[in-house]
Amino acid sequence: MPVFTAVMNHINDTIAAISTPPGEGGIGIVRLSGSNAVLIADKVFVSSRNKRLAELKSHSLTHGFVRDNLSNKRIDEALVTVMRAPRTYTREDVVEINCHGGMNAVKAVMLLVLKEGARIAEPGEFTKRAFLNGRIDLSQAEAVIDIIRAKSDRAETLALSQLEGRLSVKISALRERLTELCAHIEAHIDFPEDGPETMDKSGMTATIDSVKGELKILSSSYEQGRLFREGISVAIVGKPNVGKSSLLNALLEKDRAIVTEIPGTTRDIIEDSLNINGLPVRIMDTAGIRDSHDLAEIEGVRRSLKAIDGADIIIAVLDASKPMDGADEELLEKVRQKRAIYLLNKIDNAVADIHASRQLSPLVRVSAKTGEGIERLKEDIYSVCLANSGTEGVASEELLITNLRHKQAIDKAVNALEETKTGLQSDLHLDFVAVSARESLDCLGEIVGAVTSDDILNRIFSDFCIGK
Ligand SMILES: Nc1nc2c(ncn2[C@@H]2O[C@H](COP(=O)(O)OP(=O)(O)O)[C@@H](O)[C@H]2O)c(=O)[nH]1
Ligand SMILES: [Mg+2]
């Protein structure tokens, strides 16, 4: 198991970054963190009350001007926040210089603080420091990036609850029970004669089973957690002219795709996103699938077929105003292996219910033109998606595992516990049993970062944006 060694990696220097996104905006923020943050800010900033930042109260805001000492030129008007350790994001001294938005001013301010001795922060380095300085654990640090990237309210709520430490608390409780288990196993090694206060084998087995049960529930919540965090993709497919583009527009409630009565209008994949009960859904309108001699359309059809392969859910559209034909049959054949929702469009103009005999399920009747059935379709997308995650009703709403790294660590812990149990039951030497029990403990430690390596840390934080 790799040991935690990153703590002292040049954490003594002061870092700086532009923390607002590039482009025009009302304000742009340059953030500094480290023991020289206030000192450096004082060199580039003159407050209107003629006070040095070093003299100011912590967590206060000061008006003034950023000035280049060399040229004695004012760079921008700014508001500066001084936040002294330890009550800060990183637990170090933090200064935020709020200048006018737009890249010019922010870049000029950034260059000045670099000239005065700050170093450009790596992606995620502020949050990494918050972790290394013990303000948050690793799973909480990961929640920060999840909040920034959240694609729906639900995803945001999940990430926020992780940031607030719900997962950490749960994992700590389980780790405590495993620590106790390890202590008992090791006590048996040291004092084979059972003392009255040491757990016997059946007690150990019971602890293993109970912890394992809770871990398995957490692990199985991942399928659902992942859906809310990452969302799903849905491809609308079907013959030309059945109303795929109209359906996309109806779902999005806007005129996103061109609709005409001419078959073969849509050539490329048109993509947009919507939100169904907090589930982020990426929806794709595709070119109608048919044989064509038009090069662009042939390419469009190729992309449609590829979309069928790549999408989580297919909406296979049929036209209720016409009898089904061979091309419809071919489509049904193509989506047979996929998770599909069958959709009968143009029910406002339906001929006798010619499709009823096919027993397609689930089948939604819709008019993209009048909007009838669209809400029902959204509900179906949601329930097909969740049903397949196989965890309905298992995990409590708030505590879903959303991160693959966490799930893998939990699964490894479960395996190690299974080994521990087998070892106990087969009277394996307790030395060996203790090793697998320790391993399960370490696996859970990886989630919160109690046990970790530079590799894992670098991988996690390099995924962050600059300035966070
Ligand atoms: N009556 C009726 N016409 C529709 C409906 N949906 C689409 N259409 C018409 O069908 C034609 C083809 O629609 P379009 O969305 O471009 O189909 P696509 O080729 O599958 O993308 C257009 O003339 C639409 O106005 C519907 O629900 N009812
Ligand atoms: Mg179309």
Image: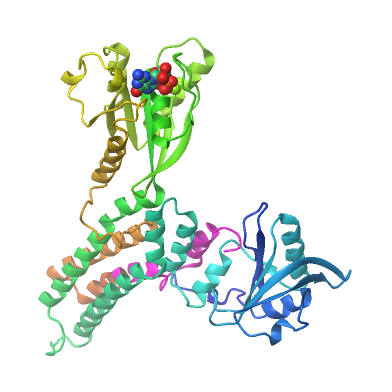
Question: In front here: 185 or 282?
Answer: 282
Q: Name the residue at 35% across, 48% down.
A: 227
* Residue occupying the far top of the picture: 293
Residue 83 at x, y percent in the picture = 60, 79
Q: Is residue 394 left or right of residue 138?
A: left
In the rendered image, which quarter is residue 222 located in?
Answer: bottom left
Q: Main secondary structure of the magenta part?
A: helix
Q: Is residue 332 left or right of residue 125?
A: left
Residue 111 vs 287, above or below: the answer is below
Residue 375 vs 28, above or below: the answer is above
Residue 371 at x, y percent in the picture = 34, 30
Residue 103 at x, y percent in the picture = 72, 55
Q: Is residue 396 left or right of residue 47?
A: left
Residue range highlighted in magenta: 440-468
Residue 323 visible in the displayed image: yes
Residue 381 at x, y percent in the picture = 30, 39
Q: Name the residue at 17% across, 24% down.
A: 359
Query: Is residue 465 located in the magenta-colored stretch of the structure?
Result: yes
Question: In front here: 33 or 210?
Answer: 33
Q: Name the residue at 46% across, 16% down.
A: 264
Residue 288 visible in the displayed image: no
Question: In front here: 31 or 330?
Answer: 31
Q: Is residue 350 left or right of residue 235?
A: left
Q: Quadrant of ligand 1?
A: top left
Quadrant where the C terminus sits is: bottom right
